[in-house]
Image: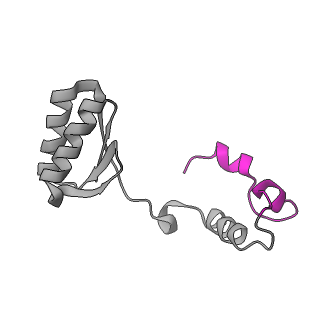
């Protein structure tokens, strides 16, 4: 998919107009951003936005996040255990004390 992010009101308006006019290319809109299908036509629309608004438009190619392929099992297990904890107000760092789950600090320093 293509992620288009706008940084000015004029660029946002142009993106909004493009999304309304070309709904078949839009996966999802987020106000100042939109996800477009990964087609040549979507790339054409993105290029037009960049040409018209320059640095006020950022275009990124994205790939969907698959938690079963892109994430270690221990992280999924920790997330599941934390979401099913008995006390919903317990912060994660207190929750992991005495368990085999990774600490929030160790997760912050490791890249996917």
The residue that appears at 68% across and 69% down in the rendered structure is 83
Side (left or right) of 84 relative to 98:
left
Which image quarter: residue 24?
A: bottom left
Judging depth in this view, the residue of 8 and 65 nearest the camera is 8
Which quarter of the figure has residue 109? top right
Q: Position of residue 4 (x, y in %)?
A: 29, 42
Q: At which x and y percent is residue 38?
A: 22, 54
Q: Quadrant of the N terminus?
A: bottom left
What colouring method underlies this structural image?
A: one colour
Work out whether residue 28 or residue 44 is closer to the camera in this orientation and state it. Answer: 28
Q: Is residue 96 visible to the viewer in this orientation of the structure?
A: no
Q: Does residue 49 appear anywhere in the picture?
A: yes
Question: What residue range appears in magenta?
Answer: 89-112
Nearer to me, 82 or 18? 18
Which residue does the image show at 44% across and 59% down from the upper left?
65
Query: Percent x, y for residue 82?
Result: 72, 67
- Vertically, is 57 above or below 21? above
Q: Is residue 56 magenta?
A: no
| Residue pictured at 84% horizontal, 57% vertical | 94
Q: Note whether 14 is above or below 41 in the view shown.
A: above
Task: From the viewer's perspective, tell me whether residue 62 is left or right of residue 78.
Answer: left
Q: Is residue 93 magenta?
A: yes
Point out the residue furthest to the top here. 55
């Amino acid at each position: 998919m293509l992620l288009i992010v706008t940084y000015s009101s004029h660029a946002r308006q142009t993106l909004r107009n493009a999304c309304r006019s070309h709904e078949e290319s839009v996966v999802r809109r987020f106000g100042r951003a939109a996800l477009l299908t990964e087609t040549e036509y979507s790339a054409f629309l993105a290029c037009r936005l960049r040409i018209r608004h320059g640095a006020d438009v950022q275009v990124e190619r994205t790939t969907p996040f698959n938690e079963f392929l892109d994430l270690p099992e221990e992280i999924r297990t920790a997330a599941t255990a934390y979401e099913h904890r008995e006390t919903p107000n317990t912060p994660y760092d207190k929750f992991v004390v005495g368990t085999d789950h990774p600490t929030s600090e160790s997760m912050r320093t490791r890249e996917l």
